[in-house]
Amino acid sequence: MILIGLHLAIFLLYFERKGSALIQDRVGANRASITGLGKKFGIPNLGIVNTLLADPIKLFTKEDFVPAGADHFLHTLAPFVALFPVLITFVVIPFGDTITIGSRTFGLQAANLNAAALYLLATIGIGVYGVALGGWASNNRWALLGGIRATAQMISYEIAMGLAIIAIIMTYGTLDLQEMVRMQGGVWFGWLPRWGIFVEPIAFILLLTAGIAESKRVPFDLPEGESELILGYMIEYSGGKQAAFMLTDLAEQALIAMLLVTFFFGGWQVPWLYRDGFHLPGGLTIAVAPLLVSIAGIVAFLVKVVMVCIFMGLIRWTLPRFRYDQLMRLGWKILVPLGLANILITAFVVVVSGGAH
């Protein structure tokens, strides 16, 4: 699952450059080429070599610069403290139900924890230490200001994220992410998928907004703020350390997309597809082999995650950045009260309906 998350981060690295260029009607990354045959035969340069090969080689071969007066140990440790919590969070995301190969059946989840939702909150909260250490250990006022901004922002929006996840736990009555996904199987009214977004739309808005803020992406990129902080907490980082911080941001975006898909879009569930095949509206049934059903679930999960990542990318390259006071006001005066109200509404509905979803 960690490999899936890292590959999604690589996709996002490409989309951040070439996708944003298409959105903003400009050429984007297009110069680096290995053979030059594309230009010779009139094939448009997609920027793949530039983005996925030339830039990483450039980063990992640059000098590892540590500024004078900086704490060398913490300066080196910070990028990995930021990246590690994201990577260990991927292990509880279910990317499929089960798959049977020969006589053995495997669960498609790296770590099937009964309290996976609590594990999520714990590991996501650790990530703030890496950013704070990076800003403080750099011995740079702009880096320190970026680290302070990041700390305040991530703590503020973690509360909104936690409130959204609490509402989801109340709705499904379990802390197990795999069970949450299984509960989203089937349909309402004979055709509507039982996805969480139809049950908890407010929690979806909360988790989407807080997730973008947690990953420090536009319109919540105040910790990096190129126009006033140059690059914020990352300003004194170069080479592989800077690449680790950049990978952390992209991996966080992939993680948030996976959580949104798991909680609100049925996870690996394919609408109208069950273990024995498709049960389409109108009573039509199409038999499908169990192995193909398992593979279809994995593919559906990945497609949903990529679509959510693209949607988050559209937000990044469309909306302007908030002012810092607007950022704090949105988190504390709008999202937190909305999350508390949503928990009260959810509790009332659960009690009235006689149990969890």
Image (cartoon, rainbow, N blue to C red):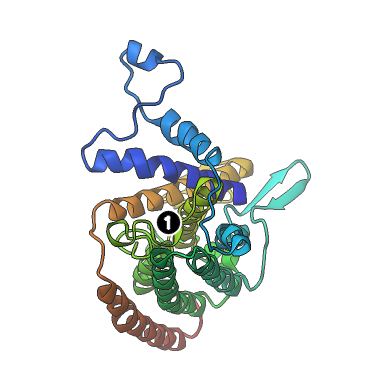
Residue sitting at 48 percent across and 86 percent down? 354
**Whole-percent x and y of residue 31?**
35, 26
**Whole-percent x and y of residue 173?**
55, 78
Q: Is residue 281 visible?
A: no
Say what amino acid the circle numbered 1 marks: Ile
Q: Residue furthest right?
A: 103
**Whole-percent x and y of residue 122?**
58, 73
Q: How many marks?
A: 1
Rendered position, 211 above or below 36: below
Residue sitting at 50 percent across and 63 percent down? 138
Mark 1 Cα-neighbour bin, 10 Å: few <14, some 14–19, many ≥20: many
Question: Based on the displayed image, in which of its 4 quarters is residue 50 positioned?
Answer: top left
From the viewer's side, name the closer residue of 8 and 250: 250
Q: Residue furthest left?
A: 25
SS for dot 1: loop
**Side of 352 where 296 appears, left or right:** right
Residue sitting at 26 percent across and 38 percent down? 22
From the viewer's side, name the closer residue of 272 and 140: 140
Residue sitting at 29 percent across and 76 percent down? 330
From the viewer's side, name the closer residue of 342 and 56: 56
Question: Based on the displayed image, in which of its 4 quarters is residue 347 positioned?
Answer: bottom left
**Side of 147 where 221 appears, left or right:** left
Question: Based on the displayed image, in which of its 4 quarters is residue 21 positioned?
Answer: top left
Q: Is residue 294 visible?
A: yes
Q: Residue furthest top?
A: 40
Rendered position, 117 above or below 332: above
Look at mark 1 in the image and give the residue it sits on.
235
**Whole-percent x and y of residue 232?**
39, 61
**Side of 97 where 54 appears, left or right:** left
